[in-house]
């Protein structure tokens, strides 16, 4: 049963990522075509749950392939940390959540037996009392 779910998640993954690319492309396109700029650029440090170089590379590339974001640095400490530049960052907590949603789906494909580990605590979630 585990492998059936893994196969389904693996087959669904390209459609999920394609939808993310279309969604963010339309956001960037709208900003380019309308007068003024609604961008709120920022650099954000994102701790990850990636254990292998493959997982880290895949996540960093997925972020960079998504319009409006680019991975600019990878910290090799444990946990692996990505430095991401985003064009539309209203608040860091929701940006972290979006990146971790992408990471959840990636880890569900790369770790069929182990499953997806819990998300790391961020400074914003710790301040709100979330863990």
Image (cartoon, helix red, strand yellow):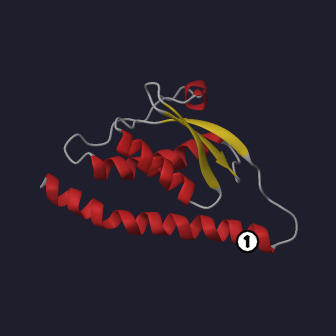
Residue drawn at (50%, 47%) of the image: 60
Q: Position of residue 29 (x, y in %)?
A: 70, 71
Left or right of 106 in this view: 130 = right
Local SS, label 1: helix
Q: Position of residue 38 (x, y in %)?
A: 80, 59
Q: Quadrant of residue 53?
A: top left
Residue at far right of view? 36
Task: Work out whether 93 lies above or below 35.
Answer: above
Left or right of 54 in this view: 128 = right
Label 1 neighbour load within 10 Å: few <14, some 14-19, many 20+? few
Residue drawn at (77%, 56%) of the image: 39
Residue drawn at (87%, 65%) of the image: 36
Q: Nearer the viewer, residue 69 or 129?
A: 69
**Residue that numbered label 1 is attached to:** 30
Task: Work out whether 35 lies above or below 85.
Answer: below
Q: Position of residue 46 (x, y in %)?
A: 55, 37
Left or right of 40 in this view: 130 = left
Q: Position of residue 27 (x, y in %)?
A: 67, 66
């Amino acid at each position: 049963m585990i492998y059936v779910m893994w196969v389904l998640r693996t087959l669904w993954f390209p459609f999920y990522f394609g939808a993310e690319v279309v969604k963010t492309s339309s956001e960037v396109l709208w900003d380019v075509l309308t007068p003024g700029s609604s961008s709120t650029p920022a650099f954000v440090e994102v701790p990850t749950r990636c254990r292998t170089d493959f997982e880290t590379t895949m996540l960093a590339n997925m972020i960079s392939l998504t319009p409006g974001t680019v991975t600019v640095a990878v910290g090799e400490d444990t946990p692996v940390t990505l430095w991401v530049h985003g064009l539309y960052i209203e608040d860091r907590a929701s940006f972290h959540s979006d990146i971790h949603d992408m990471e959840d789906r990636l880890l569900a494909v790369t770790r069929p037996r182990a499953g997806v580990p819990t998300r790391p605590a961020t400074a914003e979630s710790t301040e709100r009392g979330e863990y």
